Image: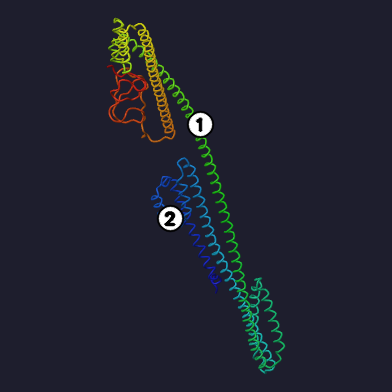
Amino acid sequence: QRRLFDLYTQEQVLDIAKEDQEAAHFSKRAQIWQTMRRAVLDDRINARTTDEEWADFVAKTDKEGLLREQDLAEFRRRLQWDEEDEIAARKNLVLMADLQSQFDLKIAELGFAHKLDRRRFAQELEAEEAETRKQRERVVASLEADMEVAALERDLAALKQATRHAADAEDRVEEVRALEHKLDQARLQADDRRRQLLDDADLAHTLRRAEHDLEQRFRSEDARLDNTIVRERHELEAEVKLGQAKTQSAIDDLELESIRKEGELGIDFMRQLKSVKREDREESNKIDRTHMEEMARVNREDAYERQLAAQEAQEHSQKLETARREQEHAQELARQAAAQAAQEQAERMAQERLAMEQQFELDRIARMGELSTEALIALSPVERGHILAEVKRTEQFKDLSEDQILALASERNPELARVLVEKQELATEGKLKAAEAAMWEKLADERVKAQEALRAQMQAQMDAQAAHSADQNAQVERMAKEAAERQERISSAAMDNMADVAKTAAQRPDQSGTTVVYPPGGSAPSVGPMTTSPTPTGGGGAPSGGEVQVCPNCRVKSPVGEKFCNNCGHQFFDT
């Protein structure tokens, strides 16, 4: 008796075991994906899951390491999407887990179906083997019955021949009848068995061939009945041996036929197995294509959503850029307005400074007109003091005579003293009139020279005063320009701070930023200094050491002790 696995080679048995192992592997993978799907739905794993929690979850869920690293990485990457894509990511993860589960379950079902088909084929093969064995037993039994009938017929023929030659034929009549009765029964049994064999279509040809052989043997036996009993017995023995050989040959033929049928069944089984494998591969390819199409659809949806997000981000960026440009334009307008205001303020301050200087000069001239000559000499510079002293000395000459004036003038003018001496000499010589004419002419020339020198000195003083006024005007203009630049820097810094505040508010930072405090825009008291701490500041002002005072008009810092503001000329205190 042959078994199913006796027909398989060692390679086929290993392939079957490998397929069983793969089916169990994919079934376990499907269970793991279902567990991960339930974990995602229960929110046990999400985008906020840390690396340690993820590693612990994977170690507990996939203890045997059946899932691929790239599948786990893709699963984790989808979990780590942004919060705004959490809903879409959850749907995609659930769908991916379902597809993976369906794919693995389908592979497991196909593996189990292969196993059931192999068992069914094995059962059919065993049933066919049992049926073949039963047919072979029936054929052998029929042949044995035919041989028994032939032996009985030969015995009967031998008895008939013997009764013809023997004298005691009457004594053997009963024995002949008994043999005939047995022969009839054997023929009936052979006919029954022959009819049973004829019912089997697969063995009809074998039965007809056996009947033909038996008929030939019966005819040959009838032809040889006339021979002697000894010769007939030898022939009968040879015939029996020949029948046994033919029976063995028929049995061998049946065995070969059975083996051939078993081989055909094995080939059919292998063909069916290959067909099932081919169908499995087609089904697996179909599942893979479905999975790839689904993944492509999900990727297209993701790309579309990302494109929408990129468009929204671009629109938001354009809005921010427009707001920034509008803010820069507003800053530029504010800067220009601040610069214009600073320039107007500088011009106004220059005009006020010029008016103050003119008024101061007028007041000074008026007050100097009220002062005495001695006071003017004391308050005037050295050159102007000499001139005033000369004027004072000239005023002293108004009540003196000519000789007294010449005498006083000769004290400081050696040439005049020499002239007076000559005058005296001429007076003694009687030449006074001509000498006086020459002297007075010479005095007139010296007076003209003195007046020209005094005029040149006064012109030089006026030029010096004009240069001083020009320097003061240049200083006023420079201070006005510095004030305008300072005002522009303050305005630009304020606009930058406003831009930073707007940008910070747009980007929603935390609330721990730097607080910017601007100086008050209202006017301060017009008198008295404003004293601040000696902390150094970034703006233009006093040095870092010592206290400073702030002008209430232009807010410029000056060292404590300065009477006037260096920028606008404000008077801090009265003397």
Q: Three-letter amino acid code at disc 1? A: Thr
Q: Quadrant of residue 379?
A: top left
Image x and y of residue 232, in percent: 67, 91
Kindly identify which residue carries mark 1: 322
**Farthest residue toward the front?**
429
The answer to whether 522 is drawn above or below residue 72 in the figure is above
Task: Where is residue 460? Give x, y as percent.
Answer: 39, 18
The residue under label 2 is 62
Q: How is the image coloured?
A: rainbow
Instruction: Determine whether, in the image, residue 574 is placed left or right of residue 467.
Output: left
Quarter of the rendering occupied by the C terminus: top left
Q: Is residue 203 above or below residue 42?
A: below
Residue 185, compared with residue 67, is above or below; it is below
Q: In which quadrant of the rendered view does residue 372 lie? A: top left
Marks 2 and 1: which is nearer the front?
1
On the rendered structure, is 502 left or right of 304? left
Sequence-wise, the earlier of marks 2 and 1 is: 2
| Image-quadrant location for residue 134 | bottom right
Give the image location of residue 484, x and y in percent: 42, 24
x and y percent of residue 358 in the render? Answer: 38, 14
